[in-house]
């Protein structure tokens, strides 16, 4: 049996060819649930465990937790730009460099967990208000080209589950109950 790919515990991202209204509702539910699922994934971990990389050469659990609101804030803002401007070119960011900043390497995860909860609460309200045409609105990523909001929703629903699995898979491998 091949060894699992620790980088992609739920598999690499793969966008579906079509997304139905029911699919979108499921993806929104995944975003709604993500903060509680991340909080549960890190519950009871001490600083030593939070400072353990989820894989060799990977980020620590602490960095993963801080990365989630960083990344999802960027996405939330991209949604707002796409809804208020015609195909705006967005600013990308160096997530790897952000993860190396002092607060991401050393800071308490409490603020990032709270930030993720508040951000997702607001983001879900926005997502639930969108009409059919809104989902086709787009922005232009400088490296990846045009992305519509429907594609972005699917990506970020996966993204939360992806990082949750980094943490839960590490816990399972390490025997951290």
Image: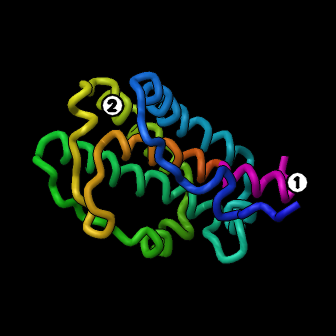
Is 175 in the magenta? yes
Residue wearing tag 1? 175
Tell whether 43 sits left or right of 27: right
Q: Report the Cα–Cα distance between label 1 and label 2.
A: 37 Å
Residue wearing tag 2? 127
Going from the N terminus, do you reach mark 1 or mark 2 first? 2
Can you give x and y, in whole percent of width and height, for residue 126 in the image? 29, 31
Q: Which residues are magenta?
A: 165-177
Dot 1, how many residues are within 10 Å of its Cα: few (below 14), some (14-19), or many (20+)?
few
Residue 173, image quadrant: bottom right
Can you give x and y, in whole percent of width and height, for residue 79 in the image? 27, 44
Judging from the image, what secondary structure is the residue with disc 1 in? loop
Residues 94 and 105: in front is: 94
Indicate which label's residue lies in the foreground, 1 or 2: 2
Can you give x and y, in whole percent of width and height, for residue 35 in the image? 53, 39
Main secondary structure along the magenta-highlighted residues: helix
Q: Is residue 145 above or below residue 175?
A: below
């Amino acid at each position: 049996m091949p060894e699992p790919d620790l980088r992609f515990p739920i598999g690499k991202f793969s966008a579906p060819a079509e997304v139905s209204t029911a699919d979108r509702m499921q993806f929104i539910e995944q975003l709604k649930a993500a903060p509680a699922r991340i909080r549960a994934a890190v519950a009871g971990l001490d600083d030593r465990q939070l400072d353990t990389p989820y894989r060799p050469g990977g980020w620590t659990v602490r960095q993963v937790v801080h990365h989630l609101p960083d990344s999802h804030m960027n996405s939330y803002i991209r949604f707002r730009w796409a809804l208020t401007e015609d195909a705006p070119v967005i600013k990308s960011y160096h997530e790897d460099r952000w993860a190396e900043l002092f607060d991401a390497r050393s800071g308490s995860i409490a603020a990032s967990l709270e930030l993720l909860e508040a951000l997702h609460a607001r983001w879900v309200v926005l997502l639930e208000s969108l009409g059919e045409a809104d989902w086709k609105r787009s922005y232009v990523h400088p490296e990846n080209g045009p992305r519509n909001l429907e594609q972005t929703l699917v990506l970020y629903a996966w993204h939360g589950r992806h990082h949750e699995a980094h943490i839960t898979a590490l816990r399972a491998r390490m025997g951290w109950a």
